[in-house]
């Protein structure tokens, strides 16, 4: 439990927040746009409060909201509404500190200032590290409690290939994963090949190869997210780590079923979009 001061207590006559205890932290999967929901449920003598933040890859903390002090039932209802819309895990304090720091690093690059409610959130989580910081592949290896020279074993590679080949088919944490942006639209409009060429492999080579490090870092982060799972059941961290390691390296991406699935999902999403525009 932590003690903290807060000038915005639940009423004007009570400027001191009493002892605040974190009940749990939750983090959603990362969606196709690189956005992730982070939630903290806490309690004090005033009742229960929930903070919800949205952090987006390379942009940072784009939205933060908190409830009034209320009942646990009311706060759990809010949590369930998020869990219905996107796969969510209960995570450790370590993951929350990590994503606070990474998100603020992105904010410093995008020059987008987090909402004041973010500072209130941090204030209530006393002694939480929030100094901005980027994380590379070596940092994730450390966060995953692996030796610096750790590489996936042949068995882990086979297992990771098999598991990742089901990610998009099963939905769950990979629901809505596809690539989006001007680079994809340019490819669809100008570079997509004729029927004589394997369109999926062509898309992997021309859309995903140039941005492979983006997907490698996203999967490293998914590995740490799964590693930080506070419960026993959930996605396997080692599968995310294995695929991140392969994508981070120089293996041609068309050899990875997961990347071919991403290409197919991307082409399907844009086919649907262009179909809507033409009707």
Image (spheres, grey):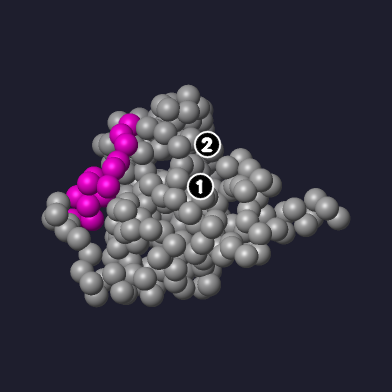
Q: Are marks 1 and 2 in contact (CB under 8 Å)?
A: yes
Q: Is residue 239 visible?
A: yes
Residue 63, position as x, y percentages in the image: 54, 38
Dot 2 alpha-carbon crowd within 10 angstroms: few under 14, some 14 to 19, many 20 or more: some
The tag earlier along the polypeptide, 1 or 2, is 1
Q: Nearer the viewer, mark 1 or mark 2?
A: 1
- Determine the CA span between mark 1 and mark 2: 9 Å
- Residue that appears at 62% across and 48% down: 191
Q: Which residue is mark 2?
A: 62
SS at mark 1 in the image? strand
Determine the residue positioned at 22% across, 46% down: 138
Magenta span covers which residues? 132-145
Viewer-nearest residue: 218 or 196: 196
Which of the numbered marks, if any, corresponds to residue 35? 1
Q: Is residue 44 left or right of residue 178?
A: left
- For label 2, the SS is strand
Q: Position of residue 123 (x, y in %)?
A: 36, 33
Q: Is residue 144 magenta?
A: yes
């Amino acid at each position: 439990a932590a003690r903290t001061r807060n000038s915005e207590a639940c009423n004007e006559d009570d400027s001191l927040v009493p002892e605040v205890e974190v009940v749990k932290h939750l983090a959603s999967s990362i969606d196709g746009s690189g956005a992730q929901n982070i939630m903290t449920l806490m309690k004090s003598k005033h009742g229960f409060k929930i903070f919800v933040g949205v952090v987006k890859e390379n942009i940072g903390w784009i939205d933060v909201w908190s409830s009034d002090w209320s009942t646990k039932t009311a706060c759990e209802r809010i949590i369930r509404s998020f869990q219905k819309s996107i796969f969510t895990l209960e995570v450790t304090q370590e993951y929350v500190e990590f994503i606070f720091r990474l998100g603020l690093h992105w904010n410093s690059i995008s020059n987008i200032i987090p909402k004041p409610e973010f500072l209130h959130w941090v204030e209530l989580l006393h002694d939480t590290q929030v100094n901005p910081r980027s994380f590379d592949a070596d940092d994730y290896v450390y966060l995953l409690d692996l030796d610096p020279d750790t590489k996936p074993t042949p068995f882990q590679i086979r297992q990771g290939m098999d598991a990742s080949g089901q990610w998009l088919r099963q939905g769950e944490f990979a629901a809505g994963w596809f690539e989006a942006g001007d680079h994809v639209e340019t490819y669809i409009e100008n570079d997509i090949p004729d029927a004589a060429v394997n369109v999926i492999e062509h898309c992997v080579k021309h859309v995903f190869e140039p941005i492979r490090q983006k997907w490698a870092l996203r999967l490293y982060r998914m590995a740490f997210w799964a590693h930080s799972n506070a419960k026993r059941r959930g996605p396997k961290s080692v599968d995310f780590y294995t695929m991140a390691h392969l994508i981070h390296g120089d293996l041609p991406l068309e050899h990875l079923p997961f990347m071919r699935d991403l290409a197919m999902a991307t082409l399907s999403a844009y086919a649907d979009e262009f179909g809507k525009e033409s009707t």
